[in-house]
Image (cartoon, helix red, strand yellow):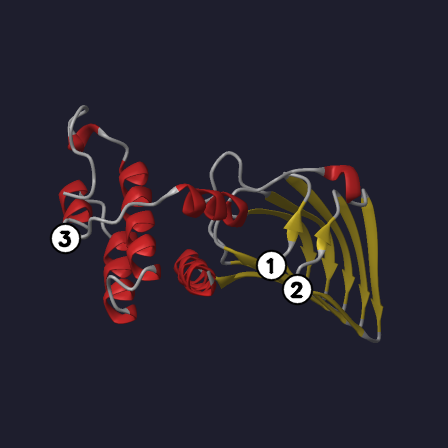
Amino acid sequence: MAIDTSGVKLEDRPIAQVREEVIDQLIMNYSHNVISAEAFERRLDEATNSDDHHVLVQLVADLSLKPDNAYQEQRERSFTPNYDSSDASENERMIAILSSNEHSGQWMVPREMEIYVLLGSIELDFTDAVFNHQRVTIRVKNLLGSVDVKVPEGVNVVSNMFNVIGSTTNTAPSMGGRQAPQIVIEGVSILGSLDIAIKKTIKEKLVAFANSFKEAFRAK
């Protein structure tokens, strides 16, 4: 059996820990062509949706290849935040007056951001952003404009907006762990809108990581 079930009773182990081990096992075997892409995604769906210890373990019961040091190092670089503020700015200001402005791609997130919108729009896409600070504060002053915030799963978002004939919509669940980045959005919106939503799910990030690891293994 792929997952070690000796020691602590399986049902008494934290379900998140068991799920992570199962997902690591799936990625490792997929990247080495032990299972097909279809089988990998099917089992990954089951792993992310199940809270049954035994169901999770059975998903990798026929897989003997275990994550090695190279895999663990790559996973650590890809999924563990490294908060090093030495090269990051502390404050950044974005202004959109009768215009649009956006941040996307692998941009460096400052500790604080000030956003001013007047009859314009601003988009902040944190999907591939590099967080140098665990807590990021965004202060918004929005008049007759729109602010769109896109985040991946695993980033906590808290909204403390004061709306005057405006709207704030936050559909991004705060599911990140204690070490996850936290974005706090505060300010005022008058006849404007603030929309916060998930752009890339954890499953999508895992599939992308699995494919990149597979390509790296193939290139060796």
Disc 2 residue crowd, few under 14, some 14–19, many 20+, Cα 10 Å: few
Disc 1 residue crowd, few under 14, some 14–19, many 20+, Cα 10 Å: some
- Residue at point 76%, 61% (across, down): 142
User: Is there a contact, CB below 8 Å, between mark 2 and mark 3?
Assistant: no
Across and down, in percent, residue 41 comes to 29, 65
The reply to whether residue 174 is visible in this rendering is no
Q: Tell me the residue that label 3 is attached to.
A: 62
- Side of 29 relative to 202 (left or right): left
* Mark 1 secondary-structure assignment: loop
Q: Tell me the residue that label 2 is attached to.
A: 105
Q: Quadrant of residue 132?
A: top right
Quadrant assignment for the N terminus: top left
- Side of 188 relative to 66 (left or right): right
User: Is there a contact, CB below 8 Å, between mark 2 and mark 1?
Assistant: yes
- Side of 157 relative to 192 (left or right): left
- Side of 77 relative to 186 (left or right): left
* Mark 3 secondary-structure assignment: loop
Q: Tell me the residue that label 1 is attached to.
A: 128
Q: CA distance from mark 2 to mark 3?
A: 38 Å
**Three-letter code, disc 1:** Asp
- Residue at point 41%, 57% (across, down): 206
